[in-house]
Image: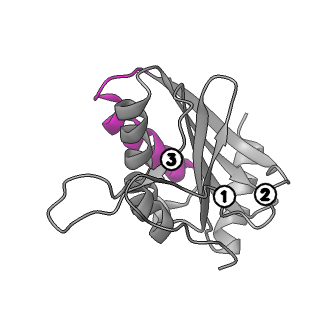
Amino acid sequence: MNATTPTISRGAPVSTERRPEAARPPATRGGTSWLLPSEPSSVPRARRLAIAQLGVWGLHDFSDDAELLVSELVTNALRHAGGPIRLTLSLCSVDRAFRCEVADEHPGELRVRRTCGDDEDGRGLHLLDLLSRCWGSTCTAAGKVVWFELHPPAVALEAALEEAHMTP
C-alpha cells in the first residue's frame, strides 16, 4: 500500500490523507446520496442504505466491511457534529473503487485515540485504516467530509459501473 499510516497517540491530529494522488478528484459514476437527521436511528438506516446500494451494484462481497465502516463514520458524525449528516456512495472509475463519504457540520480535525483493551469506543479510525484501501478527511465550507474506498476485483467493479451507467 502506498499509504502513510498515521501516528497514533491520544488526541493527536491524524494525517487524514492516504490517497497517493491526493490532488486528483475521483471521477464518479452511479453515485447516490441521502441526508440523514442527527439522531441515533440514522446509524442503522445508513447501514441498510449502504448494503442495499452495494446489492444494486452487485458488490455483495464488500457489504460487511462497508456496513461496519459506514456505521463508524455516521456514529462519529452524530457524536461530534450535531447537525444533519450526508451519506454519499459512489463508484470511482478512475480509482477503480467503491467510495463512501460522510459529510457533517463539524470543522474539527479527526483524531486517532490510543485505546486500551476494555475501552468501548475510540476504534473507528483504526478500523478505517485496517479495512479500507484508502481514506481521508476534507474540510468544507460547512464542516468536513470523511471518506473511505474499498477496491473490489476489476470484474465486479466493471459490472457495477455498467449497472450504474444503465440505471437512470
Q: Which residue is mark 2?
A: 22
* Amino acid beneath label 3: Leu
- State left or right for residue 140 relative to residue 78: right
* Amino acid beneath label 1: Glu
Q: Position of residue 53 (x, y in %)?
A: 53, 45
**Label 2's element?**
loop
What residue lies at 50% left-to-right and 52% top-to-bottom? 55
What residue lies at 70% left-to-right and 24% top-to-bottom? 141
Q: Earlier in the sequence, mark 2 or mark 3?
A: 2
Q: Is residue 134 visible?
A: yes
Q: Residues within 10 Å of mark 2 (few under 14, many from 20)?
A: few
Q: Earlier in the sequence, mark 1 or mark 3?
A: 1
Q: Nearer the viewer, residue 8 or 70?
A: 8
Q: Which residue is mark 1?
A: 17
Q: Position of residue 72 (x, y in %)?
A: 38, 48
- State left or right for residue 132 relative to residue 114: right
Vertical placement of 133 versus 33: above or below?
A: below
How far is the residue under mark 2 from the one under mark 3?
17 Å
User: Which residue, as the protein is rendered here, is positioned at the far left?
Assistant: 118
Q: Quadrant of residue 127?
A: bottom left
Q: Which residues are magenta?
A: 37-56
Q: Which residue is mark 3?
A: 110
Q: Could you tell me if the residues under marks 1 and 2 are in contact, i.e. CB atoms within 8 Å?
A: yes
Q: Nearer the viewer, mark 2 or mark 3?
A: 3
**Label 3's element?**
loop
Q: Could you tell me if the residues under marks 1 and 3 are in contact, i.e. CB atoms within 8 Å?
A: no
Q: Quadrant of the N terminus?
A: bottom right
